[in-house]
Amino acid sequence: MYRAKIEVTLRPSILDPQGKATRHALHNLGYTAVEEVRIGKLIEMHIDAATKDAAHDIAEAACRKLVANEVMENYSIVLTKMDESKV
Amino acid sequence: MYRAKIEVTLRPSILDPQGKATRHALHNLGYTAVEEVRIGKLIEMHIDAATKDAAHDIAEAACRKLVANEVMENYSIVLTKMDESKV
């Protein structure tokens, strides 16, 4: 069993209105030192696979087919083996 | 200038309907090896502060007051110094 930590971020050229609104709200609260905010998604999956490569293939397919929009977003996958005794 | 990478995740005891829907959709696509999906937020901020401690204080305040809902969510902050020449 592997834990996949997937970070989905907007490509740098894509505007991020949610991030801009957050930055604006922080400035209104007095935190004017915050100069840029960008918001992405963090997805954690538990994947039942025999090898790390197999787990990576599944996570990658999940990103391409469902989780990420490759036109607008980048994604990165980090896999760690889960301690079965704690599952 | 510091880059704060903030991960906001639902507390383990809180149900995650968005993650459950994603897991269900992945199963429908044939990826039945995916056993659990939880979805969080990934926020990147650029913070103009003199020291790492000062930047951390601002990021922490931003989380507590705006970005994270501490009743339902956990957050973690990782700060890295930005290369000014590339800003």
Image (spheres, coloured by chain):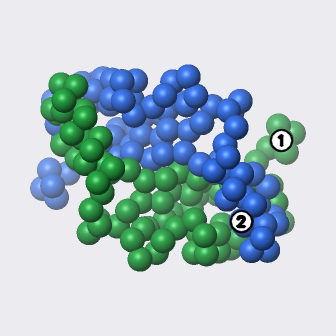
Chain colours: A green, B blue
B70 displayed left or right of B54: right
Q: Quadrant of the rendered structure where residue B40 is?
A: top right
Image coordinates of residue B42 in percent, x first then y, are 45, 47
Q: Residue at x 22, y 25 (%)?
A: A29
Question: From the viewer's perspective, is residue A48 above or below residue B9?
Answer: below
Q: Where does the C terminus of chain B fall, quadrant-wise?
A: bottom left
Question: From the viewer's perspective, is residue B27 above or below residue B74?
Answer: below
Q: Residue at x 63, y 31 (%)?
A: B11
Q: Residue at x 30, y 48 (%)?
A: A19
B12 displayed left or right of B45: right
Q: Which residue is mark 2?
A: B25
Image coordinates of residue A31 in percent, x first then y, are 20, 28
Q: CA distance from mark 1 to mark 2?
A: 23 Å
Q: Quadrant of the rendered structure where residue B51 is?
A: top left
Q: Residue at x 26, y 69 (%)?
A: A13
Question: From the viewer's perspective, is residue A22 above or below residue A80?
Answer: above
Disc 2 element: helix
Image coordinates of residue B65 in percent, x first then y, are 36, 24
Q: Where does the N terminus of chain B fall, quadrant-wise?
A: top left
Q: Which residue is mark 1?
A: A87
Task: Tell me which chain the residue with mark 1 is part of.
Answer: A
B71 displayed left or right of B25: left
* Label at residue A58: none
Q: Amino acid at mark 1?
A: Val
Please state which of residues B26 and A45 is positioned toward the viewer in this rendering: B26
Q: Amino acid at mark 2?
A: Ala
Task: Tell me which chain the residue with mark 2 is part of.
Answer: B
Residue B7 visible in the shown view: yes
Please state which of residues A64 and A87 is positioned toward the viewer in this rendering: A64
Disc 1 element: loop
Image coordinates of residue B49 in percent, x first then y, are 17, 32
Of all residues, the one furthest to the right in this rendering is A85
